[in-house]
Image: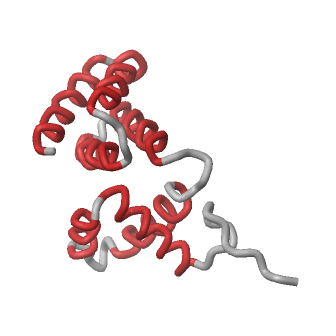
């Protein structure tokens, strides 16, 4: 009986395969430059965390077939706005553009977040988005 190939959702992958799949997704979404900087700044204290996010967040979750990357970006932006994770928001605004969201769609995500996460959260998100989008 032939063995079935590993699934894109990570089931049946070894840790090394999951890491490779995660690194590919991470680089495509966040950019080679960002990932290279994160790897270069890895210390003995952060090495396990870098491995965890590459295998789990990127190799398992971002690589699942259930949502496309545009949809995942919308979900991530909304969550980051709601939780006030501003540094991550800037990074994922850049990723959202790479994943195909338009500036108009990003504006709509932030407006929608104002209703469910609060006006102050959206106000901060608009400030960060303005800075990021002006850079891009």
User: At which x and y percent is residue 89?
Assistant: 28, 42
Q: How many marks?
A: 0
Nearer the observer, 131 or 82 = 131
Is residue 115 toward the left or the right of residue 128 in the image?
right
Q: Is residue 59 left or right of residue 7?
A: left
Q: How is the image coloured?
A: secondary structure
**Which one is in front, 87 or 92?**
92
Q: Answer with the quarter of the image where residue 10 lies.
A: bottom right
Residue 107 found in image quarter: top left
Q: Give the vertical position of 128 relative to 22 (above or below).
A: above
Up-down relation of residue 135 to residue 127 (above or below): below
Q: Position of residue 16 (x, y in %)?
A: 53, 81
Picture coordinates of residue 97, whole percent (x, y): 30, 44
Direction right: furthest residue: 1
Position of the N terminus, as image quadrant, is bottom right
Q: Residue furthest bottom?
A: 1
Residue depicted at 61% across the width and 47% down the height: 66
The quadrant of the rendering that contains the C terminus is top left
Above or below — where is 113 with respect to 22? above
Q: Residue at x 25, y 71 (%)?
A: 36
Is residue 89 shown above or below 19? above
* Left or right of residue 135, residue 81 in this image: right
x 26%, y 47%: residue: 94
Asked which quadrant contains residue 129, the reply is top left
Q: Nearer the viewer, residue 80 or 112?
A: 112
Q: Position of residue 57 (x, y in %)?
A: 47, 59
Question: Residue at point 37% right, 38% down?
Answer: 77
């Amino acid at each position: 009986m032939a063995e079935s190939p590993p699934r894109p959702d990570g089931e049946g992958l070894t840790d090394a395969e999951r890491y490779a799949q995660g690194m590919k997704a991470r680089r495509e979404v966040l950019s080679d430059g960002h990932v290279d900087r994160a790897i270069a700044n890895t210390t003995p204290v952060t090495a396990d965390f870098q491995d965890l996010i590459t295998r789990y967040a990127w190799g398992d979750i971002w690589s699942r077939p259930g949502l496309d990357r545009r949809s995942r970006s919308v979900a991530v932006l909304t969550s980051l706005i709601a939780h006030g994770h501003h540094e991550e928001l800037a990074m994922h605004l850049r990723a959202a553009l790479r994943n195909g969201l338009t500036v108009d769609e990003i504006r709509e995500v932030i407006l929608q977040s104002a209703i469910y996460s609060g006006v102050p959260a959206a106000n901060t998100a608009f400030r960060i988005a303005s800075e990021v989008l002006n850079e891009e």
